[in-house]
Amino acid sequence: MSDHGHAHPGDVELDLPSATGRALTWVAVALAVLTVVGMAVLWPDGSGQDAFIDSGFTREYVDAEVVAANERPCENIPDGYATETPVCGTYTIRLLEGPDAGLELSQEVFDVATGSRFAVGDVLVMAYDPAVGDLQLEPGVTLPQGAEYSIKDRNRKAPLVVLAVLFAVVVVALGRLRGLAALGGLVATIVLLLAFTLPAIIDGRNALAVAIVSASAIAFLAIYLAHGVTTMTTVAVLGTLAALLLTALLGWLFTNAAQLTGFANEEATYLAIGSAKISISGLVLAGVVIGALGAIDDMTVTQVASVAELHRANPDYGFRELYAAANRIGQDHVASTVNTLVLAYAGASMPLLVLLAVTDQPLAGVANSELIATEIVRTLVGSIGLVAAVPLTTLLACLVVRRGSVVAAAH
């Protein structure tokens, strides 16, 4: 890819005629206000979470430690079971926190050979459901103490924290202040998703509207935090929003045309059982829009920077020459990024792809299954939005820079 692709729109400033600068600013401000208004209208009230609590789908989680392990051949094996000699485990577990901290309880695990094998000293996450303790097997007979707890998973917090810290150190070491700003954008994105996007969808708000508003807010936050508030970063934001709207429109058209219901996995079924408010098909659309955002804003930032650098290096370029040169840079970027999107989705679905491969289904049959069709729509719609971001952003950037003069920004 051309060296221009590594520039940043915050590295240059644009001296524009006052009328052009005001128009660009007003468009950005208007879109920002619409985003804030959209968030206010769609802001969650917590009713969806309450519905999940009433349905018994929420659990509390506590840490526990394995203090004894006893593994043995399983008894009463079902006919035709996949494992000829499954191993069962009885584990004594001490709760490390919660209302029953210090309590030791026994947990039975069937076929630990194909599941998780725990050793003494392992720290686990236990699901706590207080309602289970009130159940009665028969009148006057209650479940034993500790029946409210069940093994959820291993505790992986420590390595995840170490990895997150390592990631932050690498980003700041290489990017310095810009890397620190990018981390700020990442944190803002996570906070917005957790505080607004997910709760709003759980509350039954229109998932596509929530996704568009969320993506718009993330675009403003991430781009301005990482690259500064300049005319050229504003152009990048506008190009990102234009490409996102196109992506949302195509996603809506093709999820409906392909009749994607969203019920392609167990998680969707659980959500539907837990709350009737959530639109499962809407989740597919929301995933398309938000999933495409990261690649699109990378593309628009690169294109805006490329146009600015080309114009600064070649101020005599006419509009067509500038647009053609910047578009060539975008074509290189598209070629690599589209492949990245496909590989990212394939990597996330690798166990499923392997399972489908061993079933020896024809390719057309595999693609027709809703689970794979959903990923195909997600990948292709996102890729079209990504490709469209190049001419859209390049056109806007060329129109803007041709009206002013580009100079190096003061840092």
Image (cartoon, helix red, strand yellow):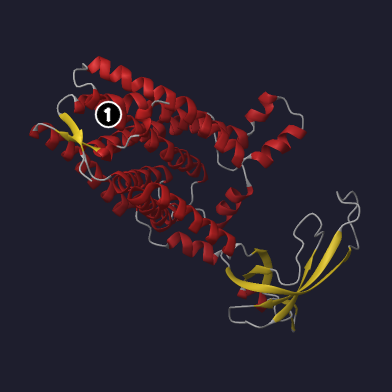
Image height of 217 relative to 112, above or below: above
Q: Quadrant of residue 392?
A: top left
Image height of 229 relative to 296, above or below: below
Tally the numbered discs: 1
Q: Nearer the viewer, residue 292 or 337?
A: 337
Q: Nearer the viewer, residue 367 or 280?
A: 367
Q: Quadrant of residue 151?
A: bottom right
- Amino acid bearing label 1: Glu
Q: Position of residue 171 (x, y in %)?
A: 43, 50
Q: Nearer the viewer, residue 269 or 32?
A: 32
Quarter containing the N terminus? top left
Report the residue at 42% width, 62% height from top: 46
Q: Is residue 277 visible?
A: no
Image height of 388 relative to 54, above or below: above
Instruction: Left or right? Give the position of 379 relative to 368.
Output: left
Report the residue at 34% width, 56% height from top: 43
Instruction: Left or right? Give the position of 341 relative to 358.
Output: left
Q: Nearer the viewer, residue 209 or 387?
A: 387
Instruction: Left or right? Give the position of 317 relative to 66.
Output: left
Q: Quadrant of residue 124?
A: bottom right
Residue at the disc numbered 1: 309
Image height of 67 relative to 187, above or below: below
Report the residue at 37% width, 20% height from top: 328
Q: Position of residue 36 (x, y in %)?
A: 27, 50
Q: What is the secondary structure assignment of the residue under circle 1?
A: helix
Q: Position of residue 263 (x, y in %)?
A: 59, 43
Q: Is residue 358 visible?
A: yes
